[in-house]
Amino acid sequence: MMLASLVLSDARFPGGGHVHSGGLEEAAERGLVGDVASLHAFLRGRLRTAGRVAACAAAAAAQLAVDGGGDGWAALDAALDARTPSVAQREASRAQGRASLRAVRAAWPAPVLGALLTAHPRPHHPLLTGAVIGGTGEPPSAAARCVAYLAVSGPASAAVRLLGLDPFAVNAAIVALGDDLAAVVDEAASLADGPPEDLPAPGAPVLDLMAESHVHHHRERVRLFAS
């Protein structure tokens, strides 16, 4: 990994990721996650569904940045929208992308960002991440790895805060996902230069329903995370 993908996958990057739990807060509230074993199952399911969609989109964005982008950003943005049926999930993705934009512009001022923002002023986080990583010369696999890792590391960090789990055991649960993460990265890299409509679209209806429920409950009582 080169510097861009390392920095963007760092929890200290000021991209707003600390306010998103990836559905973990709602899952914990419903008693679906309460220990390390159930957390591992949740993370594995998230990686193979929402994480897979995001990683493949990020890889495609990285390839598009290498190719010059052109009119392809709008098609890729629409493809990711179509693969994110939950309005709450789409909003969370765009909110985190928007939150990352200022820091990204300061660190990597590049024409590719202007082209991406022309497609949508609030870019999806995986597309922004992929555009930066590809624009700095890293391969699509690096973008996929960064986004796939964030798909599990964010909820894992939230679990420590919400459930008081042993952080060493939580980190071990992430490491145990190594083979699953590698498979997602390999698939994303293999599809990066294909048409957006060929990107995978695995369903995650429980995550979608919990995302919508979380937004509803957020209005009724204080929640620690925005998603």
Image (spheres, helix red, strand yellow):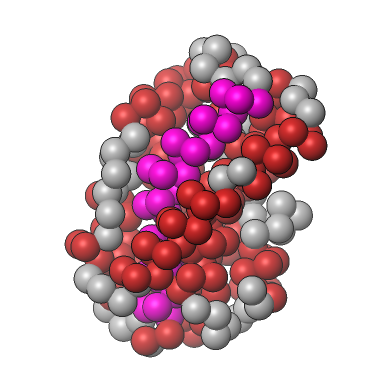
42 displayed left or right of 118: right
Dominant secondary structure, magenta? helix
Query: Can residue 219 be seen in this snapshot?
Result: no
In which image quadrant can residue 218 be found? top right
In which image quadrant can residue 116 be found? bottom left
101 displayed left or right of 162: left
Look at the picture and state if 98 lies above or below 38. Answer: below
Q: Is residue 61 magenta?
A: yes
Residue at image point 77% right, 22% down: 164
Residue 84 vs residue 102, the one in the foreground: 84
Query: Can residue 71 be seen in this snapshot?
Result: yes
Residue at image point 27% right, 49% down: 201
79 displayed left or right of 152: left
Q: Which residues are magenta?
A: 36-65
Percent coordinates x, y for residue 221 in the rendering: 59, 14
Percent coordinates x, y for residue 23 in the rendering: 51, 31
Look at the picture and state if 112 lies above or below 120. Answer: below
Please tell me how many numbered marks the rendered image carries: 0
Percent coordinates x, y for residue 179 in the rendering: 52, 52
Q: Is residue 160 magenta?
A: no
Residue 40 vs residue 11, the one in the foreground: 40
Looking at the figure, which quarter contains the N terminus?
bottom right
Residue at image point 46% right, 62% down: 185
205 displayed left or right of 132: left
Look at the picture and state if 189 lies above or below 13. Answer: below
In which image quadrant can residue 171 be found? top right
Look at the picture and state if 212 lies above or below 188. Answer: above
Residue at image point 66% right, 26% down: 36
Percent coordinates x, y for residue 78 in the rendering: 27, 58
